[in-house]
């Protein structure tokens, strides 16, 4: 069954990736696009400064951009939101109150106790929180969140290693400039530099990871009891968050044990090549995230560089931050909503 979808914040970096992923998707048909008031009323091809390697799909180029307002977009089965957090905080609940189902990449409400924060491979069972949400918020709609792109890059690998009882995690990230959006940090600003902080990023990784890895008993969530500490850096690469992880586990885990756990985990690849960046980042022609299909290039999470030392396991993980980490994450959550009958 094909579901009609809309995109809130369709002209930004993640909004454009959402269009790239949703246009070829067999389960979704884009029928509404919203952006700022300045863009409203224009055909999409005139409203967006398109910056993706694949051209604006013809099916989208002529859609008239609407105001980001529940009264402006008509009936769609599902909304994908890539709104800035400050706008999403105000606008997303209004869409849920109007009865829309929202799959959001926007960082507001991710830690709310009645909002499912989901990576389908890790904690699809947390979707049951939507029943709690409808009771607590009294709305007919629903809101599901995907985590921060740097969190998504790491947490599936932690979930794989949690089989040995995760107790303590340290992570240092090397994050691409596209994570800051088209008008954030430009690669020219940091062409020969690295920026040792990304506002609020560490706190997001530390709290979101524990929520994602925590349990859900059908009524409330429990946070995972591992401690997580993060240090986040911006480096002059265009796409791709690379992360160095140190993971301590209660049970002894060798490199072989860890490799086996990672290799057998849904959506994680251990690339054979010594340079996963090259193997993963051939810009995919038409990436299509599908829960039930082999990951296309740009949608897998890579892990490698496994080492064991006296503090435990050390390894690297890598993901395309806008394809897998932001837009793709929202699309996979949209697929899960459809699969579980919420659309
Ligand atoms: C970043 N993870 O990389 C943040 C938001 N996309 O800037």
Image (cartoon, rainbow, N blue to C red):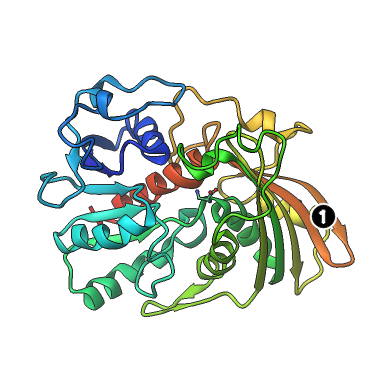
- Helix, strand or loop at label 1? It is helix
Residue pointed to by mark 1: 255
Is residue 134 something that shows in the picture? yes
Q: Picture coordinates of residue 306 (x, y %)? A: 80, 50
The outermost residue toward the right is 310
Determine the image quadrant of residue 66: top left
Please rate how many residues cluster around mark 1, counting C-alpha atoms within 10 Å: few if below 14, some from 14 to 19, many from 20.
some
Can you say whether 261 is above or below 55 in the image? Answer: below
Can you say whether 189 is above or below 111 in the image? Answer: above
* Left or right for 267, reference 19: right
Q: Picture coordinates of residue 218 (x, y %)? A: 37, 77
Q: How many marks?
A: 1
Determine the image quadrant of residue 130: bottom left
* Left or right for 62, reference 270: left
* Left or right for 157, reference 321: right
Query: Image point 76% across, 52% down: which residue?
Result: 315
Can you say whether 12 is above or below 148 in the image? Answer: above
Q: Picture coordinates of residue 303 (x, y %)? A: 69, 46
Query: Image point 48% across, 62% down: which residue?
Result: 123
Query: Image point 35% across, 58% down: which residue?
Result: 86
Determine the image quadrant of residue 231: bottom right
Is residue 1 something that shows in the picture? no
Q: Picture coordinates of residue 148 (x, y %)? A: 50, 55
Query: Image point 32% across, 49% down: which residue?
Result: 81
In terms of depth relative to the viewer, which is nearer, 339 or 282? Answer: 282
* Left or right for 327, reference 31: right
In terms of depth relative to the viewer, which is nearer, 192 or 26? Answer: 192
Decide if ligand 1 comes within 8 Å of the CB at mark 1.
no
Quadrant of the rendering where the N terminus is positioned: top left
């Amino acid at each position: 069954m094909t579901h009609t979808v809309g995109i809130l914040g369709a002209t930004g970096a993640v909004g454009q990736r959402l269009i790239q992923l949703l246009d070829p998707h067999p389960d979704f048909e884009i029928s509404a696009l919203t952006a700022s008031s300045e863009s409203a009323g224009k055909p999409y091809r005139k409203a967006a400064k398109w910056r993706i390697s694949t051209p604006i799909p013809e099916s989208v180029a002529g859609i008239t951009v609407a105001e980001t307002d529940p009264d402006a977009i008509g009936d769609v089965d599902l909304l994908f939101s890539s709104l800035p957090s400050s706008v999403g905080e105000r606008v997303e609940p209004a869409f849920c109150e109007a009865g829309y189902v929202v799959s959001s990449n926007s960082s507001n409400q991710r830690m709310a106790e009645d909002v499912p924060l989901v990576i389908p491979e890790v904690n699809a069972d947390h979707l049951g929180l939507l029943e709690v949400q409808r009771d607590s918020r009294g709305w007919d709609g629903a809101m599901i969140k995907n985590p921060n792109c740097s969190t998504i890059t790491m947490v599936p690998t932690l979930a794989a290693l949690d089989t040995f009882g995760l107790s303590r995690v340290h992570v240092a990230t090397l994050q691409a400039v596209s994570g800051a959006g088209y008008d954030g940090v430009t690669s020219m600003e940091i062409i020969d530099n690295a920026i040792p902080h990304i506002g609020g990023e560490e706190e997001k990784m530390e709290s979101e990871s524990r929520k994602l890895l925590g349990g859900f008993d059908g009524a409330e969530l429990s946070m995972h009891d591992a401690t997580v500490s993060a240090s986040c850096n911006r480096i002059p690469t265009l796409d791709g968050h690379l992360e160095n992880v140190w993971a301590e586990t209660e049970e002894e885990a060798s490199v072989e044990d860890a490799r086996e756990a990672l290799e057998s985990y849904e959506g994680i690849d251990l690339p054979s090549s010594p340079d996963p960046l090259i193997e993963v980042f051939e810009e995919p022609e038409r990436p299509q995230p599908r829960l039930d299909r082999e990951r296309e290039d740009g949608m897998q999470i890579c892990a490698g560089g496994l080492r064991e030392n006296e503090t435990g396991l050390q390894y690297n993980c890598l993901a395309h931050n806008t394809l897998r980490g932001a837009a793709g994450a929202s699309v996979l959550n949209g697929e899960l909503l459809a699969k579980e009958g919420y659309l």
